Image (cartoon, rainbow, N blue to C red):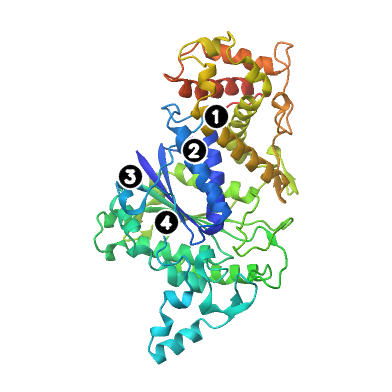
Amino acid sequence: MKRLFVFAIGGTGSRVLKSLAMLLAAGVRTNQQSDYEVIPIIVDPHKSNDDLKRTVDLLRVYGKIAEHATLDGRGFFGTKIKTLDKITSSAERHGSSFTFQLQEVSNSRFRDYIEADLMQPANRALTELLFSGTTHSKRGDKVDLLDIEMEIGFVGNPNVGSVVLNQFSESREFKDFASNFNESDRIFIISSIFGGTGAAGFPVILKNLRDAMNLKDVDAKGFLQNAKIGSLTVMPYFNVESDGKSAIKRGDFISKTRAALHYYQENVTGNNSVNAMYYIADPYHGKAYKNDPGYGGQRNDAHFVELASALAIIDFMGMHDDMLRTTNGIAEEPVYKEFAVRNDKESLVFNDLSDETLSLIRAQMTKMSMFVEFMRDTRFHETIGSPDDWMKEKPQITPEFIGSTFVQSHLQEFIQLYLDWLEELSRNRRGFAPFNIGNIENLIADLAPKSSWLRPFTFERFRETLNEVTKKPTGSTPETKLLDVLHQAATQILARYYDIKG
Protein backbone atom coordinates (compact mmCIF):
# COMPACT_ATOMS: atom_id res chain seq x y z
CA MET A 1 0.00 0.00 0.00
CA LYS A 2 1.18 3.52 -0.77
CA ARG A 3 1.98 5.81 2.12
CA LEU A 4 1.75 9.57 2.54
CA PHE A 5 4.10 11.02 5.15
CA VAL A 6 2.66 14.31 6.40
CA PHE A 7 5.11 16.63 8.15
CA ALA A 8 2.93 18.99 10.19
CA ILE A 9 5.07 21.89 11.42
CA GLY A 10 4.11 24.13 14.33
CA GLY A 11 0.66 24.98 15.66
CA THR A 12 -0.86 25.54 12.23
CA GLY A 13 0.44 22.14 11.13
CA SER A 14 -1.37 20.43 14.01
CA ARG A 15 -4.63 22.26 13.35
CA VAL A 16 -4.61 21.42 9.63
CA LEU A 17 -3.82 17.82 10.51
CA LYS A 18 -6.86 17.76 12.82
CA SER A 19 -9.13 18.89 9.97
CA LEU A 20 -7.56 16.28 7.70
CA ALA A 21 -8.34 13.53 10.22
CA MET A 22 -11.96 14.72 10.45
CA LEU A 23 -12.36 14.67 6.65
CA LEU A 24 -10.75 11.24 6.34
CA ALA A 25 -12.97 9.92 9.14
CA ALA A 26 -15.98 11.07 7.09
CA GLY A 27 -14.63 9.28 4.01
CA VAL A 28 -13.64 12.35 1.96
CA ARG A 29 -11.46 11.30 -0.97
CA THR A 30 -10.99 12.21 -4.64
CA ASN A 31 -12.13 9.90 -7.41
CA GLN A 32 -8.51 9.45 -8.46
CA GLN A 33 -7.19 8.92 -4.95
CA SER A 34 -5.29 5.67 -4.50
CA ASP A 35 -5.48 3.82 -1.23
CA TYR A 36 -2.98 5.54 1.02
CA GLU A 37 -1.91 5.05 4.58
CA VAL A 38 -1.30 8.44 6.19
CA ILE A 39 1.64 8.75 8.57
CA PRO A 40 1.67 12.11 10.40
CA ILE A 41 4.95 13.46 11.77
CA ILE A 42 4.32 16.53 13.93
CA VAL A 43 7.33 18.83 14.23
CA ASP A 44 6.81 21.25 17.11
CA PRO A 45 9.06 21.91 20.13
CA HIS A 46 6.04 23.24 22.04
CA LYS A 47 4.85 19.93 23.51
CA SER A 48 2.42 21.63 25.91
CA ASN A 49 0.57 23.24 22.98
CA ASP A 50 -3.12 22.42 23.48
CA ASP A 51 -3.76 22.34 19.74
CA LEU A 52 -1.03 19.71 19.38
CA LYS A 53 -2.45 17.69 22.28
CA ARG A 54 -5.96 17.76 20.83
CA THR A 55 -4.68 16.63 17.44
CA VAL A 56 -2.71 13.76 18.95
CA ASP A 57 -5.79 12.70 20.96
CA LEU A 58 -7.86 12.71 17.77
CA LEU A 59 -5.29 10.70 15.81
CA ARG A 60 -5.06 8.16 18.63
CA VAL A 61 -8.82 7.56 18.83
CA TYR A 62 -9.08 7.59 15.01
CA GLY A 63 -6.62 4.69 14.91
CA LYS A 64 -8.63 2.71 17.47
CA ILE A 65 -11.82 3.09 15.44
CA ALA A 66 -10.19 2.57 12.02
CA GLU A 67 -9.06 -0.91 13.06
CA HIS A 68 -12.69 -1.94 12.55
CA ALA A 69 -13.47 0.00 9.36
CA THR A 70 -14.58 -1.79 6.20
CA LEU A 71 -11.82 -3.11 4.00
CA ASP A 72 -12.78 -1.23 0.83
CA GLY A 73 -11.69 2.04 2.45
CA ARG A 74 -14.72 3.98 1.21
CA GLY A 75 -16.76 4.25 4.37
CA PHE A 76 -16.13 5.94 7.69
CA PHE A 77 -12.48 5.83 8.86
CA GLY A 78 -11.49 4.03 5.65
CA THR A 79 -8.02 5.63 5.43
CA LYS A 80 -5.52 4.18 7.88
CA ILE A 81 -3.54 6.64 10.01
CA LYS A 82 -0.41 5.19 11.61
CA THR A 83 2.47 6.32 13.79
CA LEU A 84 6.01 6.22 12.40
CA ASP A 85 7.05 3.37 14.70
CA LYS A 86 4.37 1.13 13.17
CA ILE A 87 6.27 1.05 9.87
CA THR A 88 9.85 1.16 11.17
CA SER A 89 9.67 -1.33 14.06
CA SER A 90 11.63 1.18 16.12
CA ALA A 91 9.25 1.85 19.00
CA GLU A 92 12.03 1.00 21.42
CA ARG A 93 13.90 4.08 20.20
CA HIS A 94 11.23 6.74 19.98
CA GLY A 95 8.00 5.22 21.22
CA SER A 96 4.53 5.13 19.72
CA SER A 97 3.95 8.78 18.91
CA PHE A 98 2.89 11.13 16.15
CA THR A 99 5.39 13.79 17.25
CA PHE A 100 8.97 14.22 16.16
CA GLN A 101 11.24 14.53 19.19
CA LEU A 102 13.44 17.62 18.88
CA GLN A 103 16.44 16.81 21.00
CA GLU A 104 17.70 19.14 23.75
CA VAL A 105 15.03 21.78 23.18
CA SER A 106 12.75 21.33 26.18
CA ASN A 107 13.68 23.55 29.11
CA SER A 108 16.53 25.01 27.10
CA ARG A 109 17.50 28.54 26.15
CA PHE A 110 18.71 29.15 22.62
CA ARG A 111 22.00 30.43 24.06
CA ASP A 112 22.59 27.09 25.80
CA TYR A 113 21.49 25.08 22.79
CA ILE A 114 24.18 26.61 20.54
CA GLU A 115 26.68 26.77 23.44
CA ALA A 116 27.26 30.46 22.84
CA ASP A 117 29.12 30.92 26.13
CA LEU A 118 31.73 28.33 25.05
CA MET A 119 32.47 29.95 21.69
CA GLN A 120 35.69 31.73 20.84
CA PRO A 121 35.34 35.51 21.34
CA ALA A 122 35.16 36.27 17.61
CA ASN A 123 32.51 33.60 16.95
CA ARG A 124 30.55 34.65 19.98
CA ALA A 125 30.55 38.29 18.84
CA LEU A 126 29.31 37.25 15.37
CA THR A 127 26.57 35.10 16.93
CA GLU A 128 25.41 37.97 19.13
CA LEU A 129 25.30 40.20 16.06
CA LEU A 130 23.31 37.71 13.99
CA PHE A 131 20.84 37.09 16.81
CA SER A 132 20.60 40.59 18.18
CA GLY A 133 17.30 41.98 19.32
CA THR A 134 14.88 41.23 22.11
CA THR A 135 11.79 39.17 22.72
CA HIS A 136 9.53 38.52 25.71
CA SER A 137 9.93 35.81 28.32
CA LYS A 138 7.03 33.88 29.87
CA ARG A 139 7.00 36.50 32.64
CA GLY A 140 6.37 39.23 30.07
CA ASP A 141 9.70 41.01 30.50
CA LYS A 142 12.07 41.63 27.62
CA VAL A 143 15.04 39.30 27.14
CA ASP A 144 17.77 39.00 24.55
CA LEU A 145 16.85 36.80 21.59
CA LEU A 146 19.65 34.44 22.59
CA ASP A 147 17.82 33.84 25.87
CA ILE A 148 14.54 32.73 24.26
CA GLU A 149 13.05 29.74 26.11
CA MET A 150 12.42 27.21 23.35
CA GLU A 151 9.98 24.87 25.08
CA ILE A 152 7.15 26.96 23.62
CA GLY A 153 8.60 27.06 20.11
CA PHE A 154 10.43 29.89 18.39
CA VAL A 155 7.87 32.64 19.12
CA GLY A 156 7.84 34.18 15.66
CA ASN A 157 11.63 33.98 15.18
CA PRO A 158 12.37 31.78 12.14
CA ASN A 159 16.09 32.59 12.35
CA VAL A 160 16.19 30.76 15.68
CA GLY A 161 14.02 27.94 14.37
CA SER A 162 16.18 27.34 11.31
CA VAL A 163 19.22 26.72 13.51
CA VAL A 164 17.44 24.31 15.84
CA LEU A 165 15.65 22.41 13.08
CA ASN A 166 18.89 21.74 11.24
CA GLN A 167 19.30 18.80 13.63
CA PHE A 168 16.40 17.19 11.74
CA SER A 169 18.40 15.02 9.35
CA GLU A 170 20.74 13.75 12.07
CA SER A 171 17.95 12.37 14.25
CA ARG A 172 17.31 8.66 14.56
CA GLU A 173 13.65 9.23 13.71
CA PHE A 174 14.45 10.91 10.40
CA LYS A 175 16.88 8.12 9.48
CA ASP A 176 14.27 5.51 10.35
CA PHE A 177 11.76 7.31 8.14
CA ALA A 178 14.29 7.76 5.31
CA SER A 179 15.38 4.13 5.38
CA ASN A 180 11.79 2.92 5.11
CA PHE A 181 10.70 5.32 2.37
CA ASN A 182 9.56 3.54 -0.80
CA GLU A 183 9.44 4.70 -4.40
CA SER A 184 5.62 4.70 -4.40
CA ASP A 185 5.37 6.80 -1.22
CA ARG A 186 4.75 10.54 -1.10
CA ILE A 187 5.51 13.42 1.27
CA PHE A 188 3.44 16.47 2.20
CA ILE A 189 4.66 19.39 4.33
CA ILE A 190 2.27 21.72 6.18
CA SER A 191 3.59 25.02 7.49
CA SER A 192 2.55 28.58 8.17
CA ILE A 193 4.65 31.40 6.79
CA PHE A 194 3.97 34.20 9.27
CA GLY A 195 5.29 32.74 12.53
CA GLY A 196 8.47 31.07 13.70
CA THR A 197 8.37 27.27 13.69
CA GLY A 198 6.54 26.83 10.40
CA ALA A 199 8.40 29.51 8.47
CA ALA A 200 11.72 28.05 9.59
CA GLY A 201 10.79 24.39 9.36
CA PHE A 202 9.50 24.13 5.81
CA PRO A 203 12.66 25.09 3.88
CA VAL A 204 14.92 23.20 6.31
CA ILE A 205 12.93 19.97 6.09
CA LEU A 206 12.57 20.28 2.32
CA LYS A 207 16.31 20.79 1.88
CA ASN A 208 17.09 17.74 4.00
CA LEU A 209 14.71 15.62 1.94
CA ARG A 210 16.13 16.72 -1.40
CA ASP A 211 19.73 16.39 -0.13
CA ALA A 212 19.14 12.80 0.89
CA MET A 213 22.13 11.54 -1.09
CA ASN A 214 24.39 13.20 1.49
CA LEU A 215 22.88 11.29 4.42
CA LYS A 216 24.86 8.61 6.24
CA ASP A 217 23.44 5.31 7.52
CA VAL A 218 20.34 5.66 5.36
CA ASP A 219 19.01 3.31 2.71
CA ALA A 220 16.63 4.33 -0.08
CA LYS A 221 18.43 7.66 -0.63
CA GLY A 222 17.45 7.82 -4.28
CA PHE A 223 13.80 7.25 -3.50
CA LEU A 224 13.86 10.08 -0.98
CA GLN A 225 15.80 12.52 -3.14
CA ASN A 226 13.31 12.04 -5.98
CA ALA A 227 10.26 11.78 -3.76
CA LYS A 228 6.92 13.22 -4.84
CA ILE A 229 6.63 16.19 -2.47
CA GLY A 230 3.67 18.47 -1.94
CA SER A 231 3.58 21.46 0.38
CA LEU A 232 1.04 23.83 1.86
CA THR A 233 2.03 27.40 2.65
CA VAL A 234 -0.48 28.97 5.04
CA MET A 235 -0.39 32.76 4.96
CA PRO A 236 -2.09 35.04 7.52
CA TYR A 237 -5.70 34.04 8.18
CA PHE A 238 -6.46 35.33 11.67
CA ASN A 239 -5.75 38.23 14.01
CA VAL A 240 -4.41 38.19 17.55
CA GLU A 241 -5.27 40.55 20.36
CA SER A 242 -2.82 43.38 21.02
CA ASP A 243 -0.53 42.69 23.96
CA GLY A 244 2.53 44.81 24.63
CA LYS A 245 4.09 42.03 26.73
CA SER A 246 3.84 39.42 23.97
CA ALA A 247 6.45 38.72 21.31
CA ILE A 248 3.63 38.04 18.83
CA LYS A 249 2.58 41.19 16.96
CA ARG A 250 -0.19 41.01 14.38
CA GLY A 251 1.41 43.93 12.57
CA ASP A 252 4.42 41.68 11.85
CA PHE A 253 2.40 38.99 10.04
CA ILE A 254 2.41 40.67 6.62
CA SER A 255 6.04 41.78 6.70
CA LYS A 256 7.15 38.29 7.73
CA THR A 257 5.01 36.77 4.99
CA ARG A 258 6.53 39.03 2.33
CA ALA A 259 10.06 38.24 3.49
CA ALA A 260 9.40 34.50 3.57
CA LEU A 261 7.71 34.49 0.14
CA HIS A 262 10.72 36.27 -1.31
CA TYR A 263 12.99 33.64 0.23
CA TYR A 264 10.78 30.82 -1.08
CA GLN A 265 10.86 32.34 -4.56
CA GLU A 266 14.63 32.19 -4.57
CA ASN A 267 15.18 28.90 -2.73
CA VAL A 268 12.05 26.75 -3.10
CA THR A 269 9.94 27.54 -6.14
CA GLY A 270 12.89 29.08 -7.94
CA ASN A 271 14.79 25.79 -8.01
CA ASN A 272 11.75 23.52 -8.45
CA SER A 273 12.18 21.69 -5.15
CA VAL A 274 8.47 20.94 -4.74
CA ASN A 275 6.21 19.00 -7.12
CA ALA A 276 2.97 20.64 -5.98
CA MET A 277 2.75 23.79 -3.88
CA TYR A 278 -0.51 25.02 -2.40
CA TYR A 279 -1.05 28.58 -1.15
CA ILE A 280 -3.86 29.63 1.13
CA ALA A 281 -4.79 32.75 3.10
CA ASP A 282 -7.87 34.62 4.26
CA PRO A 283 -7.97 38.42 3.97
CA TYR A 284 -11.02 38.45 6.26
CA HIS A 285 -9.49 38.75 9.72
CA GLY A 286 -12.53 38.76 11.96
CA LYS A 287 -12.30 37.17 15.37
CA ALA A 288 -9.00 37.90 17.13
CA TYR A 289 -7.39 35.00 18.95
CA LYS A 290 -5.94 35.39 22.42
CA ASN A 291 -2.35 36.62 22.14
CA ASP A 292 -0.64 33.59 23.61
CA PRO A 293 2.97 32.92 22.57
CA GLY A 294 2.63 29.52 24.17
CA TYR A 295 2.83 29.82 27.91
CA GLY A 296 -0.95 29.65 28.28
CA GLY A 297 -1.35 26.46 26.26
CA GLN A 298 -2.15 28.07 22.88
CA ARG A 299 -5.63 26.70 22.17
CA ASN A 300 -7.27 28.23 19.10
CA ASP A 301 -10.70 27.54 17.63
CA ALA A 302 -10.76 25.53 14.43
CA HIS A 303 -10.93 27.73 11.32
CA PHE A 304 -12.33 27.18 7.82
CA VAL A 305 -8.89 27.89 6.34
CA GLU A 306 -7.58 24.80 8.15
CA LEU A 307 -10.35 22.66 6.66
CA ALA A 308 -9.62 24.06 3.18
CA SER A 309 -5.92 23.44 3.80
CA ALA A 310 -6.63 19.79 4.57
CA LEU A 311 -8.28 19.53 1.15
CA ALA A 312 -4.91 20.38 -0.40
CA ILE A 313 -3.52 17.16 1.07
CA ILE A 314 -6.43 15.14 -0.28
CA ASP A 315 -5.98 16.80 -3.70
CA PHE A 316 -2.28 15.88 -3.64
CA MET A 317 -3.08 12.24 -2.90
CA GLY A 318 -5.34 12.23 -5.96
CA MET A 319 -2.74 13.57 -8.40
CA HIS A 320 -1.42 11.11 -10.96
CA ASP A 321 2.23 10.04 -10.71
CA ASP A 322 2.93 11.45 -14.17
CA MET A 323 2.25 14.96 -12.82
CA LEU A 324 4.84 14.53 -10.05
CA ARG A 325 8.00 13.43 -11.81
CA THR A 326 11.32 14.33 -10.16
CA THR A 327 14.89 13.90 -11.45
CA ASN A 328 17.99 14.46 -9.30
CA GLY A 329 15.88 16.23 -6.69
CA ILE A 330 14.29 18.66 -9.18
CA ALA A 331 10.56 18.61 -9.93
CA GLU A 332 10.11 18.45 -13.71
CA GLU A 333 6.74 20.22 -13.99
CA PRO A 334 5.84 21.76 -10.63
CA VAL A 335 2.21 22.66 -10.00
CA TYR A 336 0.98 25.67 -8.02
CA LYS A 337 -2.56 25.90 -6.65
CA GLU A 338 -4.73 28.24 -4.61
CA PHE A 339 -8.16 27.89 -2.98
CA ALA A 340 -11.27 30.03 -3.36
CA VAL A 341 -14.90 30.07 -2.29
CA ARG A 342 -17.94 31.08 -4.33
CA ASN A 343 -19.25 33.72 -1.92
CA ASP A 344 -17.19 36.02 0.30
CA LYS A 345 -19.22 35.88 3.51
CA GLU A 346 -18.52 36.14 7.22
CA SER A 347 -20.03 32.70 7.83
CA LEU A 348 -20.10 30.07 5.10
CA VAL A 349 -22.47 27.20 4.36
CA PHE A 350 -22.13 24.46 1.76
CA ASN A 351 -23.55 26.45 -1.16
CA ASP A 352 -20.96 29.18 -0.60
CA LEU A 353 -18.27 26.73 -1.73
CA SER A 354 -17.15 26.07 -5.29
CA ASP A 355 -18.75 23.18 -7.17
CA GLU A 356 -15.58 21.11 -6.90
CA THR A 357 -15.29 21.56 -3.13
CA LEU A 358 -19.01 20.99 -2.66
CA SER A 359 -18.94 17.69 -4.55
CA LEU A 360 -15.92 16.57 -2.55
CA ILE A 361 -17.05 17.19 1.02
CA ARG A 362 -20.82 17.80 1.31
CA ALA A 363 -22.03 14.21 1.05
CA GLN A 364 -19.29 12.74 3.22
CA MET A 365 -19.41 15.37 5.96
CA THR A 366 -23.21 15.11 6.06
CA LYS A 367 -23.06 11.33 6.40
CA MET A 368 -20.59 11.63 9.27
CA SER A 369 -22.80 14.23 10.94
CA MET A 370 -25.81 11.93 10.57
CA PHE A 371 -23.80 9.13 12.14
CA VAL A 372 -22.82 11.38 15.05
CA GLU A 373 -26.35 12.72 15.57
CA PHE A 374 -27.88 9.23 15.43
CA MET A 375 -25.42 7.82 17.96
CA ARG A 376 -26.12 10.58 20.49
CA ASP A 377 -29.88 10.79 19.98
CA THR A 378 -31.87 9.66 23.03
CA ARG A 379 -34.26 7.81 20.69
CA PHE A 380 -31.38 5.57 19.58
CA HIS A 381 -30.56 4.65 23.14
CA GLU A 382 -34.23 3.88 23.78
CA THR A 383 -34.15 1.28 20.96
CA ILE A 384 -31.14 -0.64 22.26
CA GLY A 385 -32.20 -4.26 22.70
CA SER A 386 -35.23 -3.77 20.42
CA PRO A 387 -36.22 -6.31 17.74
CA ASP A 388 -35.08 -4.00 14.92
CA ASP A 389 -33.63 -6.08 12.07
CA TRP A 390 -30.45 -4.03 11.92
CA MET A 391 -29.72 -4.86 15.55
CA LYS A 392 -30.79 -8.49 15.77
CA GLU A 393 -29.22 -9.75 12.53
CA LYS A 394 -25.79 -11.27 13.19
CA PRO A 395 -23.43 -9.92 14.28
CA GLN A 396 -25.91 -8.48 16.75
CA ILE A 397 -25.88 -4.96 18.15
CA THR A 398 -26.56 -5.86 21.78
CA PRO A 399 -26.80 -3.75 24.94
CA GLU A 400 -23.51 -5.32 25.99
CA PHE A 401 -21.85 -4.13 22.79
CA ILE A 402 -23.27 -0.62 23.20
CA GLY A 403 -21.65 -0.61 26.64
CA SER A 404 -18.30 -1.78 25.25
CA THR A 405 -15.04 0.17 25.21
CA PHE A 406 -15.34 0.61 21.43
CA VAL A 407 -18.66 2.48 21.74
CA GLN A 408 -18.46 4.14 25.15
CA SER A 409 -14.79 5.14 24.96
CA HIS A 410 -13.50 5.32 21.39
CA LEU A 411 -16.66 6.31 19.50
CA GLN A 412 -17.93 8.65 22.20
CA GLU A 413 -14.56 10.39 22.41
CA PHE A 414 -14.48 10.87 18.65
CA ILE A 415 -18.07 12.13 18.62
CA GLN A 416 -17.23 14.79 21.20
CA LEU A 417 -14.08 15.84 19.33
CA TYR A 418 -16.07 16.06 16.08
CA LEU A 419 -18.84 18.14 17.68
CA ASP A 420 -16.26 20.45 19.28
CA TRP A 421 -14.61 20.88 15.87
CA LEU A 422 -17.89 21.76 14.15
CA GLU A 423 -18.84 24.16 16.94
CA GLU A 424 -15.48 25.94 16.74
CA LEU A 425 -15.72 26.20 12.94
CA SER A 426 -19.20 27.71 13.20
CA ARG A 427 -18.36 30.36 15.81
CA ASN A 428 -15.07 31.47 14.25
CA ARG A 429 -14.83 34.41 11.87
CA ARG A 430 -14.55 33.52 9.03
CA GLY A 431 -16.96 30.80 10.12
CA PHE A 432 -18.23 27.60 8.52
CA ALA A 433 -21.63 26.42 9.78
CA PRO A 434 -23.02 23.85 7.33
CA PHE A 435 -25.15 21.92 9.84
CA ASN A 436 -27.99 22.41 12.28
CA ILE A 437 -26.25 20.59 15.09
CA GLY A 438 -28.64 18.53 17.21
CA ASN A 439 -31.32 18.20 14.51
CA ILE A 440 -30.89 15.01 12.51
CA GLU A 441 -34.24 15.54 10.79
CA ASN A 442 -33.18 18.90 9.28
CA LEU A 443 -29.42 18.61 9.39
CA ILE A 444 -28.08 20.60 6.41
CA ALA A 445 -28.27 24.32 7.13
CA ASP A 446 -28.98 25.46 3.56
CA LEU A 447 -30.92 22.47 2.21
CA ALA A 448 -34.13 21.11 3.72
CA PRO A 449 -34.98 17.43 3.17
CA LYS A 450 -37.82 16.71 0.79
CA SER A 451 -40.53 14.12 1.27
CA SER A 452 -40.17 10.70 -0.34
CA TRP A 453 -43.42 8.97 -1.37
CA LEU A 454 -45.23 11.68 0.63
CA ARG A 455 -43.31 10.66 3.73
CA PRO A 456 -41.10 13.35 5.34
CA PHE A 457 -37.71 12.46 6.70
CA THR A 458 -37.84 11.61 10.40
CA PHE A 459 -35.74 9.69 12.89
CA GLU A 460 -38.01 6.70 12.27
CA ARG A 461 -37.20 6.83 8.54
CA PHE A 462 -33.53 6.49 9.51
CA ARG A 463 -34.33 3.38 11.57
CA GLU A 464 -36.30 1.91 8.68
CA THR A 465 -33.39 2.54 6.33
CA LEU A 466 -31.04 0.79 8.73
CA ASN A 467 -33.29 -2.26 8.58
CA GLU A 468 -33.25 -2.10 4.76
CA VAL A 469 -29.47 -2.02 4.40
CA THR A 470 -29.01 -4.80 6.95
CA LYS A 471 -30.57 -7.21 4.45
CA LYS A 472 -27.29 -6.92 2.53
CA PRO A 473 -24.03 -8.44 3.85
CA THR A 474 -22.51 -6.34 6.61
CA GLY A 475 -19.36 -6.50 8.72
CA SER A 476 -18.18 -9.66 10.43
CA THR A 477 -17.98 -7.98 13.85
CA PRO A 478 -20.40 -5.68 15.70
CA GLU A 479 -17.86 -2.83 15.42
CA THR A 480 -17.54 -3.14 11.64
CA LYS A 481 -21.27 -3.68 11.22
CA LEU A 482 -22.13 -0.54 13.19
CA LEU A 483 -19.83 1.63 11.06
CA ASP A 484 -20.95 -0.03 7.84
CA VAL A 485 -24.75 -0.01 8.23
CA LEU A 486 -24.81 3.59 9.49
CA HIS A 487 -22.71 4.67 6.49
CA GLN A 488 -24.97 2.78 4.06
CA ALA A 489 -28.13 4.16 5.66
CA ALA A 490 -26.83 7.74 5.58
CA THR A 491 -25.88 7.29 1.91
CA GLN A 492 -29.43 6.19 1.06
CA ILE A 493 -31.00 8.98 3.12
CA LEU A 494 -28.94 11.59 1.27
CA ALA A 495 -29.95 10.23 -2.13
CA ARG A 496 -33.61 9.76 -1.21
CA TYR A 497 -34.36 12.94 0.74
CA TYR A 498 -31.71 15.40 -0.45
CA ASP A 499 -30.90 14.26 -4.03
CA ILE A 500 -27.22 14.10 -3.04
CA LYS A 501 -25.15 11.19 -4.27
CA GLY A 502 -21.73 10.23 -3.05
Question: How many angstroms separate mark 2 from mark 3 (CA)?
Answer: 17 Å
Would you identify the image quadrant in which residue 292 lies? bottom right
- In the image, which disc is placed on residue 62? 2
Question: How many angstroms separate mark 3 from mark 4 (CA)?
Answer: 15 Å
Q: Residue at x 48, y 74 (%)?
A: 110
Please tell me how crowded label 2 is: few (under 14), some (14-19), or many (20+) other residues with Cα within 10 Å: many
Q: Return the residue nearer the eye: 296 or 81.
A: 296
Of the image marks 2 and 1, the number of the one nearer the N terminus: 2
Q: Which residue is drawn at 57% across and 51% down?
A: 15
Residue 349: image x %, image y %?
Answer: 71, 40
Residue 289: image x %, image y %?
Answer: 69, 58
Please tell me how crowded label 4 is: few (under 14), some (14-19), or many (20+) other residues with Cα within 10 Å: many
Q: In terms of secondary structure, where does tag 4 sit?
A: loop
Q: Mark 3 = which residue?
A: 87
Q: Return the residue nearer the eye: 349 or 60.
A: 60
Question: How many angstroms separate mark 4 from mark 2 (CA)?
Answer: 19 Å
Residue 102 lies, with reference to residue 90, above or below; the image says: below
Between disc 2 and disc 1, the foreground one is 1
- Give the amino acid at mark 3: Ile
Q: Mark 1 = which residue?
A: 408
Of the image marks 2 and 3, the number of the one nearer the N terminus: 2
Residue 492: image x %, image y %?
Answer: 59, 20
- Give the amino acid at mark 4: Phe
- In the image, which disc is placed on residue 100? 4
Please tell me how crowded label 1 is: few (under 14), some (14-19), or many (20+) other residues with Cα within 10 Å: few
Question: How many angstroms separate mark 3 from mark 1 (CA)?
Answer: 29 Å
Residue 36 lies, with reference to residue 374, above or below; the image says: below
